[in-house]
Image (tube, helix red, strand yellow):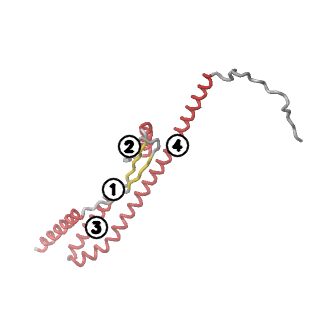
Amino acid sequence: MFKLESFSSQPEQITPGEQVFSRDAVDQAYMDGYSAGQSDMREAQLAELSQAITMLAASLADDEARRANLRAEAVAVLMPLLSEILDVMAPVGVSQRLEQALSAELARLAERAAPLRARISCEQGLMAMVRDLLDRHGLDAIEIEQSQSAQVIITLEGGRIELDPERTAAEIAALIAEITQESASWKH
C-alpha cells in the first residue's frame, strides 16, 4: 500500500528581509564548526603521526637487527679466508694469536657501522608534539627540524660503515709487529 502526500497546501511563507537566524548566531555556528573541524584535524594528524612514528621505531629496530646479522655474516665469511692466509704466512703459534687479534679487529670494524638516521621536518606548531611522541617511543636520536610546510616529512638516511684503509692497515701492522716481537722474545 502506498501513502501519497498532498503538496497542494502552501508552506508558510517567509517574508523577505525576515531573518530566521541572527547574524551573531550564524557567526557563532561558523566559529563552532571551524573550531571543531580544526580540533578534529589536529586529532587526526596526531593519530596519523603517532602511527608513522610507531612504524618508524619498528623499522629502525628491524633494520638494526638485520644490519647486525649482515655484519656478523660478513665477519664469519672472512674468517676462514683470513685463517688460511695467516696459516701460510706466519708460524703456528703466531698465526693463532694474530688470527684472534684480527678477528677481534674485524668484529670491531663491523660494529662501527653508523646506524640509520632519521629526520623529521615539521612546522613550528607541531615540533613539541613530535618531540613528545619521539620521547614516548624512546627515539631520542631522531633530529627534528622546522619547515615552512604544513606537512610532516620523515626522512631516513642510510647508515654506513666507514673504513679508513690506512688506519686499519697501520693497526694491523702494529698488531703483527707486537706479536712477532713477542714471538721473537720467546725464542731467545
**Kind of residue at badge 4:** Ala
- The answer to whether 186 is drawn above or below residue 157 in the figure is below
Query: The C terminus is located in which quarter?
Result: bottom left
C-alpha separation, residue under disc 2 versus residue under disc 3 = 41 Å
Quadrant in the picture for the N terminus: top right
In whole angstroms, how far apart are the C-alphas of marks 1 and 4? 31 Å
C-alpha distance separating marks 3 and 1? 20 Å
| Of marks 4 and 3, the one in the foreground | 4
- Residue 114's disc is 1
**SS type, badge 4:** helix
Mark 4 touches mark 2? (CB < 8 Å): no
Q: Residue furthest bottom?
A: 88
Residue 176 pos. (x, y %): 19, 69
Q: Secondary structure at mark 1?
A: loop
Residue bearing the label numbered 3: 103
Count residues near mark 2 (Cα–Cα under 10 Å), then give few for <14, some for 14-19, many for 20+. few
**Amino acid carrying mark 3 in the image:** Ser
Q: Secondary structure at mark 3?
A: helix
Q: Which residue sits furthest front?
A: 16
Which quarter of the figure has residue 147?
A: top left
Q: Residues within 10 Å of mark 4 (few under 14, many from 20)?
A: few
Residue on which disc 2 sits? 145
Please give the residue where the numbered disc 4 appears in the rendered image.
47
